Image (spheres, rainbow, N blue to C red):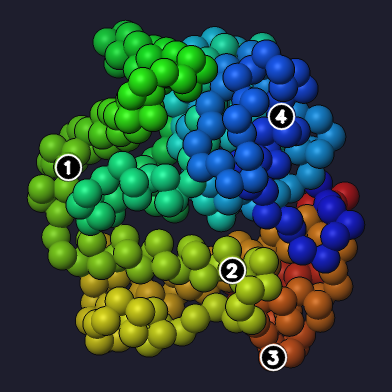
Amino acid sequence: MTTNLKLIPNLDIFSFVKNVLPDKTTCGIEGITEKSEFFMCRLSDVKPDEFLNSPFIYDFFTIYFVEKGCIAKINQLKSLEIGRNEIFFSKPGEIKTWQKLDNPNGFLVAFTLDYLLLLIDDKNLINTFDYLMPNSRRKFSLDKARLKLYKTVFNELYKEFNTISKYSVELIKFWLFVILIKTNRMHANGNGTNGLGGYKKSSDFIYNKFILIMEQNFKDLASQKVDRPFLVREFADMLNINPTYLGECVRRASGKSAKSIINQRTMLLAKCQLLHTFNNISEIAYQIGFESSGYFIRFFKKYEGITPLDYRKKWQK
């Protein structure tokens, strides 16, 4: 869906809550403010209005735990369906649009990166959460044993969030941490790791850090806080390592060059701008850091095989 705005707007937790819950007096959200960093509700209470039918850049992590029914969304231009006994994780900076809710039961959890950092003493542990990284598996089907565990944890989390009492703040963080660690182990199962990053190579940690700061760069670019994607050497400077070493680590971990990953991410942002805004080709080229529309058109055609205008026409028929 296309917005008539020049930029795809950012969505924080406060704005999200205001628009997904029509009955704000019975869903335990009286304490939600513009500075809120954590929120959860039952999926059966979610009623997205027309506000969320438009694309937004979500400024927070979300967890969708579906016990029954189904949720359909567009996530980073890809169709996403979360069905019975499934859990899905999304991360800040992703562009999402609601499509439909088919009587889902379960829970929705939202939290900011700053809130996540409060949970963990060892900040490197975040870099072992591969399922929070782009292009990783982030939807999981739960077997009987895992479903029972997740139902217990989410219900305990919801109880503490809705009936704040002594130590509720600490318990909310504890139960969220349990979800993250248990999912990390589930994701790692069969990969020769224990879910805590014990067998990760140094190149994997550097690659994950590179991806995190690159995603922040593109989030800032989409919001026009910066005027272009950073270069490989600039990312290396931010990580305090040599650009050649960064390139080697990225290739070992992903099989791709750092430049090609940046280019792929540039293409994704370009496609989102083409499909979700009315900006002309020159405006989009400028917004994502190209010096001229001609250079942008050649770049786009190299990766997609058609011009940006033809791509827009193809998907908006």
Please name which of the two marks, 2 or 3, marks the residue nearer to the observer. 2
- Looking at marks 3 and 4 on the same chain, the residue that comes earlier in the sequence is marked by 4
- Looking at marks 2 and 1 on the same chain, the residue that comes earlier in the sequence is marked by 1
Q: State the separation of the CA atoms marked 3 and 4.
A: 40 Å
Pointer 1 with pointer 4, Cβ within 8 A: no
- Looking at marks 2 and 4 on the same chain, the residue that comes earlier in the sequence is marked by 4
Can residue 187 be seen here? The reply is: no
- Looking at marks 1 and 3 on the same chain, the residue that comes earlier in the sequence is marked by 1
User: Could you say where residue 201 lies in the image, as x and y percent from the top left?
Assistant: 14, 60
- Local secondary structure at mark 4: helix
User: Could you say where residue 207 lies in the image, as x and y percent from the top left?
Assistant: 29, 65
Residue at the image position 38 percent from the left and 87 percent from the top: 233
- The crowd level at tag 4 (other Cα within 10 Å; few <14, some 14-19, many 20+) is some
Pointer 1 with pointer 3, Cβ within 8 A: no
Residue 17 placement, left or right of 113: right
User: Could you say where residue 72 lies in the image, as x and y percent from the top left?
Assistant: 65, 28
Query: Front-most of 123 and 138?
Result: 123
User: Could you say where residue 226 lies in the image, as x and y percent from the top left?
Assistant: 61, 78
Amino acid tagged 3? Glu
- The crowd level at tag 3 (other Cα within 10 Å; few <14, some 14-19, many 20+) is few
Query: Front-most of 282 and 153?
Result: 153
Can residue 28 be seen here? The reply is: yes
Identify whether 244 is placed above or below 146. below
- Local secondary structure at mark 1: loop
Q: State the separation of the CA atoms marked 2 and 3.
A: 18 Å
Q: Name the residue under label 3.
A: 291
Q: State the separation of the CA atoms marked 1 and 3.
A: 44 Å
Q: Name the residue under label 2.
A: 220
Amino acid tagged 1? Leu
